[in-house]
């Protein structure tokens, strides 16, 4: 039993959840204010069904303040019963640059072993490809990607062994 606890402390899990498909029905809205489309809402419902167990293992969710990301997180929370105290909205995550995300991750609470970011491309695709050997072309809307890091500290994630262990998107369930 003690062995398992020691192993757990040497592993960190990062889950990336790209916001669902946004609506372009409101051309006067600035990018940050664009809501989800009907298709996006249905995708979150579908992905919630297939990923509830994984999502409920995550200790903390950090979400971009863009409306489409907030709505995505809200729908996941409702469909999978994620407690609101596990969700933090952060304007820093309304970014399209992987470097900012790496810096954000390195500042995570060391007691957290599993965290999630809800946000945007191209930063998410770039972040996955920065950390893992098996490169991907794209993290599509509403996709869930999980990376396992063999390290004790979030500060070390850029220098430790990492592996893509999960990749799911709505297209897989249609």
Image (cartoon, rainbow, N blue to C red):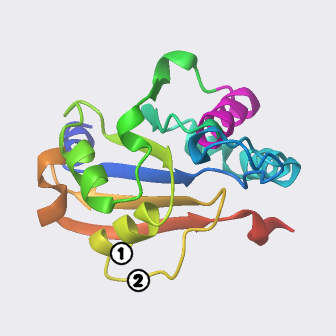
- Disc 2 from disc 1: Cα separation: 5 Å
Name the residue tied to disc 1: 129
Task: Reply yes or no: does residue 30 show up in magenta.
Answer: no
In this view of the protein, can residue 153 be seen by the observer? no
Name the residue tied to disc 2: 135
**Residue 140 location, quadrant:** bottom right
The residue furthest front is 28
The image position of residue 133, as x and y in percent, is 31, 82
Give 28 or 19, whichever is nearer the viewer.
Answer: 28
Q: Residues within 10 Å of mark 1 (few under 14, many from 20)?
A: some
Magenta stretch, main secondary structure, is helix
The image position of residue 143, as x and y in percent, is 62, 60
| 160 up-or-down from 21: above or below | below
Picture residue at 68% right of the left edge, 26% below the top: 81
Give the extent of the magenta segment. 68-81
Q: In this view, does 162 lie to the left or right of 70?
A: left
Q: Do the numbered discs 2 and 1 sit on residues whose CB atoms are within 8 Å? A: yes
**Residue 77 location, quadrant:** top right
The image position of residue 41, as x and y in percent, is 81, 45
Q: Residues within 10 Å of mark 2 (few under 14, many from 20)?
A: few
Q: Tell me, for residue 71, which label it has, or none.
A: none
């Amino acid at each position: 039993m003690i062995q398992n606890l020691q192993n757990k402390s040497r592993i960190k899990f990062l889950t990336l959840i790209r916001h669902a498909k946004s609506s372009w029905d409101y051309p006067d809205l600035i990018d940050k204010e664009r809501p989800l489309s009907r298709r996006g809402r249905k995708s979150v419902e579908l992905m919630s069904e297939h990923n509830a167990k994984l999502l409920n293992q995550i200790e903390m969710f950090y979400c971009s303040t863009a409306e489409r990301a907030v709505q995505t997180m809200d729908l996941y929370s409702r469909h999978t019963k994620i407690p609101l105290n596990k969700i933090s909205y952060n304007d820093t995550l309304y970014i399209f640059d992987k470097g900012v995300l790496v810096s954000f991750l390195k500042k995570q609470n060391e007691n957290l072993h599993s965290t999630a970011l809800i946000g945007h491309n191209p930063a998410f695709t770039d972040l996955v490809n920065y950390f893992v050997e098996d490169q991907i072309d794209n993290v599509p809307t509403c996709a869930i990607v999980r990376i396992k890091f063999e390290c004790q500290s979030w500060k070390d994630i850029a220098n430790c062994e990492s592996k893509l262990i999960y990749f799911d998107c709505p297209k897989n369930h249609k």
